Amino acid sequence: MRGYIFLPQLLHLMGLKEHLFTYGLPYMGLVGGSSVFLAMIVTLGAILRSHNKAYYPMWVALLINVINVIGNYFLIFGRAGLPRLGIVGAGISTMTCRFIAMVLLTYILFKKVSPVPPLAYFKPFPWDKIKNLLIVGLPGAGENLSYDLSQVVITYFAVLLGTASLTARTYTMHIVMFSFVFAIAIGHGASITIGHLVGRERNHAAFSIEKYSIRWALMVSVAISFLTALLGPRIFGFLSQNPDVVRLGCWVLWIDVVLEIGRAVNITAVNSLIASGDVFFPFWTGVIVMWGVATLLSYILGGHLGWGLVGIWLAMALDELVRAAVFERRWRSRKWQNKAFTR
């Protein structure tokens, strides 16, 4: 366990059995250690999208995912003369693909958007630009961090419910990503457009774009989640032979149809508010509701009342719906019109 410092404590908190540390420690070390590559990928992708080059991050992501699947196959099972590394191979594949993606996006940025800027651009240093960047970025990062920490705690509650609940939750979290991925794309597009419009003081156009974006995000997300719920028995029957996992997964997919209503609105409304300069309201609202509704009610409904994974998903759905109502009311109040920090 040398060299992993806090990883054993973290895995202990997550309830992982000690005999699984042999697999968990190296994987967490590789994947967690490559987080700097992931951070650069997210940053470079955002820069390219804001310059109307959204197709480059999309194609890089598609290419890297294909390479990652192939790499997992060869390194996990030891094909084509490569050593059979198991979970360590999966970690190596993920780390390598993240590095390749970062290099590709960096090359595209300097080739298609702008060459390496000369040092003269930074004399005098643009502190006002850095200030605006931090004003927008830090609250947004804080909200994402709060959400991730909340999900870690909720995952711990699922661990306490047993292997079947944890397995069903893990499968479901990956399945429902297909439901809200379109909402994420719409949210990013809306934020770029609204940012330009607010900067030009075209607030009415920005207001209309948000409503239009939410309408499309809602329609697609709910349609996909409903179709996924209908196919739930087939999907989980393919993934697991455990009847408890299949039963829990099917129940949760139907609850997720309601959850996706709130999530689609949240993703679009939060991106729109941040793009307009109203950055602190989504942060504080997110922190309060995520922990006061999703996390707290997951413990009460899932553990204390004994509703299990169904109770946890109901708490998460309520969290998304409450935040959706608050954020949409904030947008319709037009208080964001006076929050812009650039013109």
Image (cartoon, helix red, strand yellow):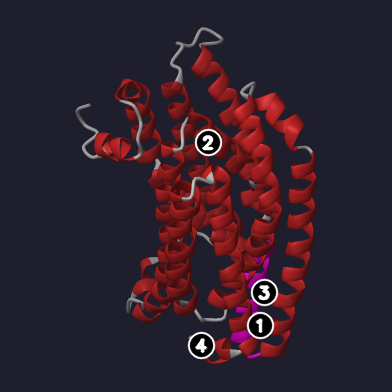
Binning the other alpha carbons within 10 Å of mark 2 as few (below 14), some (14 to 19) or many (20 upward) gives: many
> Which residue corresponds to the image point at 66% horizontal and 34% vertical from the top-left?
247
Q: Amino acid at mark 1?
A: Leu
User: Whole-Å distance between the Cαs marked 4 and 1?
Assistant: 13 Å
Q: Residues within 10 Å of mark 4 (few under 14, many from 20)?
A: some
Secondary element type, mark 1: helix
The residue that label 3 is drawn on is 193
Q: Nearer the viewer, residue 251 or 262?
A: 251
**What is the number of callouts on the image?**
4
Amino acid carrying mark 4 in the image: Lys
Crowd rating for badge 3 (residues with CA inside 10 Å; few <14, some 14–19, many 20+): some
Question: Is 156 rendered above or below residue 205?
Answer: above
State the residue lying farthest toward the front: 305
Given this view, does label 2 or label 4 mark the residue nearer the observer? 2
Looking at the image, which residue is at 73% across and 56% down? 221
Identify the mark at residue 58; answer none if there is no mark. Answer: none
Q: Earlier in the sequence, mark 2 or mark 1?
A: 2
The numbered dot on residue 339 is 4
Question: What span is in magenta?
Answer: 186-202
Please identify the quarter of the rendering in which residue 155 is found. Answer: top left
Closer to the camera: disc 4 or disc 3? 4
Q: Earlier in the sequence, mark 3 or mark 2?
A: 2
Q: Are marks 3 and 1 in contact (CB under 8 Å)?
A: yes
C-alpha span from label 2 to label 1: 46 Å
Instruction: Indicate the position of residue 65 as horizontal and vertical percent values.
Output: 61, 36
Residue that protrudes farthest toward the top in the picture: 81
Q: Cβ–Cβ below 8 Å for labels 4 and 3?
A: no
